[in-house]
Image (cartoon, rainbow, N blue to C red):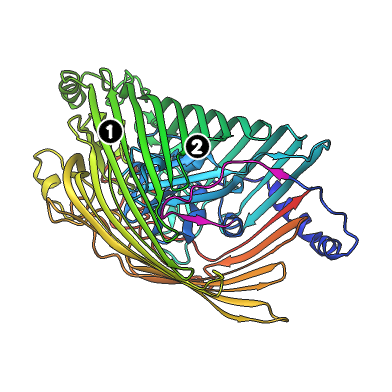
Amino acid sequence: MHYQTKPAVLAVTLALAALGQLANAADSTDVQQMPEVVVHGTRPDSQANGSSLSPAQLAAQAARSSDSAQLLQDIPGLNLHAAGGFSSLPVLRGLADDRLLVKTDGASLIASCPNHMNSPLSYMDASKVDSVQVYNGAAPVSAGGDNIGGVIVARSAAPQFAEAGQILQTGNVGAFYRSNGDARGANASATLANDHVSINYTGSTARSNNYDAAADFKQSGLAATGRAWMDGKTVGSTAYKTENHELGLAWRDNDQLLEAKVGVQRTPFEGFANQRMDMTDNSSNQLNLHYNGQFAWGELDARLYNQYVRHSMNFGDDKQTIYGIYKGMPMDSASHTLGGSLTAELALNARDKLKLGSEIQRYSLNDWWPAAGGTGGMGPNTFWNIKDGNRDRVDAFAEWQADWKAQWRSIIGARLSQVKSNTGSVAGYNSNASYATDAASFNAQNHARTDLNLDLSALARYTPSETAQYELAYAQKTRSPNLYERYTWSSNTMAAVMNNFAGDGNGYVGNANLKPEVAHTLSSSANWHAADGEAWQLRLSPYYSYVENYIDAQRYGTANNNQTATTGYVVLQYVNQNAQLYGVDVSGKLQLAKTTGLGSFTATAQLSYTRGENLTTGDNLYNIMPLNAKLALVNTLGQWTSTAEWQAVRAKTDVSAVRNEVKTPGYSLFNLRTRYENKRFSVDVGIDNVFNRFYTLPLGGAYTGQGMTMSRAGIPWGTGVAGPARSLYTAFNLKF
């Protein structure tokens, strides 16, 4: 898909043209000083072995991508499951998607799509993310429930207030351009505030055409019957267009903060290179209310959030849309999420703190596929994939933190959760046996399920000196199945391949008898560092997880070709089995030199290894990142930060046989970037994949980005999604 208008390109060009004058003005001794800004917000959670990213790290990554999940790439052990252009799914130590809890400004949103296209992080534009904290699977229970792999907390900037008696008027405008895919966009924010009330607007837009790989990875030709020509190196269905707007109002006094935010997202198109469908519309309306109060006895935090989503899919410009009498295949879903939380932190004495909390979430979903034609297999009626589905969760937790001595801290907690799910009766496009048999069997079942889940966590931290810290943590975490895992019902091949959030090209059938997953995770870390925290650091973090009732897949039905095929796409059904995951994350840095004329030079390094095994079948778990490493040389000179980065990934050979997962070769990439920032503006320039190396994304899934994707065997099997070729990018932000 191609977009012709390029306002962001023009904006970037004009901004860069003014860079020299602005730099001179900013460095002048008579530059006007900006008024002091008071920022009020909750302090970040420091009670667990979580990882966070600095504003500089976030800003550097935001220039490279409009995908908020891409901001997390500097977190050891975290990788990305490729999806749409701004909808990647984080993978933490081998666990992804709904196995992770993602909070955006405190809201726990849910993907409302049979392909999980509208992932939680996709609702927060990368330019808006101000801080990120990532907790692994052994996180304290206060971080959140209904997950077994960890918690990702993304926050926008705290509201700004003026000094007493003053008026604050501030904001910023920015734009970016990336050469691969002709990606471009803009962002803006504005704040008007006094010392008690703050009004803020943030907005962003981003769009891109298909990106190119560094070499041909399939035949050049028509993308699909009746579609335009596509080069062999073009990765089909990777174009996108989206915009976000939010209006915020905040009030504060000395010890209290009250916030209200109203946000909308409109996405007219987002392609998916590893799904058989594309997003043709996604509209989200959100309300987020937040209260924080500081009292003599401790802290009280409350939140209420509400989201309506209307989502549509069909075949995009790179996929065949005419199938005989049918022109396309419309698929629609609508959801409503209402959630809230209340947390109190009490300082019992100088040693002990007690955190008590409760959460509630009510989620409803309808997923229907309108008739594609009046007769034949896709009509005349509406196909109900999920009808009147609901999933309601109520949690309560208690957590005790004790600082026994200056060197010792412990955190012990428990969370009890009740998850209720249900759905109504379903129906296929017509009364043919291919739909009617499955529908009748499903409708005859009792769909109501109630899960009582118990989470436990215990962490001990020992800090013997100012240069060392050690942690040991254990957690039992539980996740109940989502609605698509439990309640999708049709084994019809065409319908099954449309129910897939694995990105492997296969078809999936739900299982109403699924049990919750229960993970037992043991995690430790050793952190050695210089006393100043800057000269050097080394962190070693091994982990092990045993997962009871892990939701994996088995071949569906009795057809011999589906049961025994070792190539091609197959139809699967979700099933509970047992699994284990283990590995280690290593990270470190070393200051190599600190000079007057050339600034400081620091080397950073990361290495991660994860192994995932199905203990019931002996198979490998799906989409496990192979051994990977990252080395970087960072130069800081005044207000300039420049980075030369090398990434290396080993070949992926431990693949899921039940899914016919495709192996991927190893590769290495070299990236360069530089950033200049002062009080008035910032500019980023960089080159990703400098040497234009071809590679296949290890977690990219199967390439289904073009062709006859409605049919299970209508597209070639065995091709993975290729990674982007060389891309030059730049971003500019001006503060006022």
335 over 551 or under it: above or below: above
Observer-nearest residue: 386 or 417? 417
Q: Which amino acid type corresponds to the residue marked 2 in the rendered image? A: Gly
Q: Distance from label 1 to label 2 (Cα)? A: 35 Å
For image coordinates 21% across by 18% down, the residue present is 431
View extreme (right): residue? 30
Label 1: few (<14), some (14–19) or many (≥20) C-alpha neighbours in 10 Å: many
| Left or right placement of residue 99 versus residue 162 in this view | left
Residue 538 in the image: state x and y as whole percent: 44, 71
View extreme (front): residue? 349
- Of the numbered discs in the image, which one, if any, rests on residue 229? none
For image coordinates 38% across by 58% down, the residue present is 461
* Residue 256: quarter of image: top right
| Left or right placement of residue 391 versus residue 105 in this view | left
Q: Which amino acid type corresponds to the residue marked 1 in the rendered image? A: Ala
Question: Mark 1 or mark 2, which has the lower sequence index?
Answer: 2
455 over 430 or under it: above or below: below
179 over 637 or under it: above or below: above
For image coordinates 41% across by 33% down, the residue present is 357
Label 2: few (<14), some (14–19) or many (≥20) C-alpha neighbours in 10 Å: many
Q: Verify whether residue 519 appears in magenta.
A: no
Q: Verify whether residue 48 appears in magenta.
A: yes
- Of the numbered discs in the image, which one, if any, rests on residue 106? 2
Q: Determine the secondary structure under disc 2.
A: loop
Observer-nearest residue: 486 or 701? 486
Residue 483 seen anywhere in this rendered image of the structure: yes
Stretch of the chain drawn in magenta: 38-54
Q: Determine the secondary structure under disc 1.
A: helix
Residue 518 in the image: state x and y as whole percent: 23, 43
- Of the numbered discs in the image, which one, if any, rests on residue 495? 1
Tag in front: 1 or 2: 2
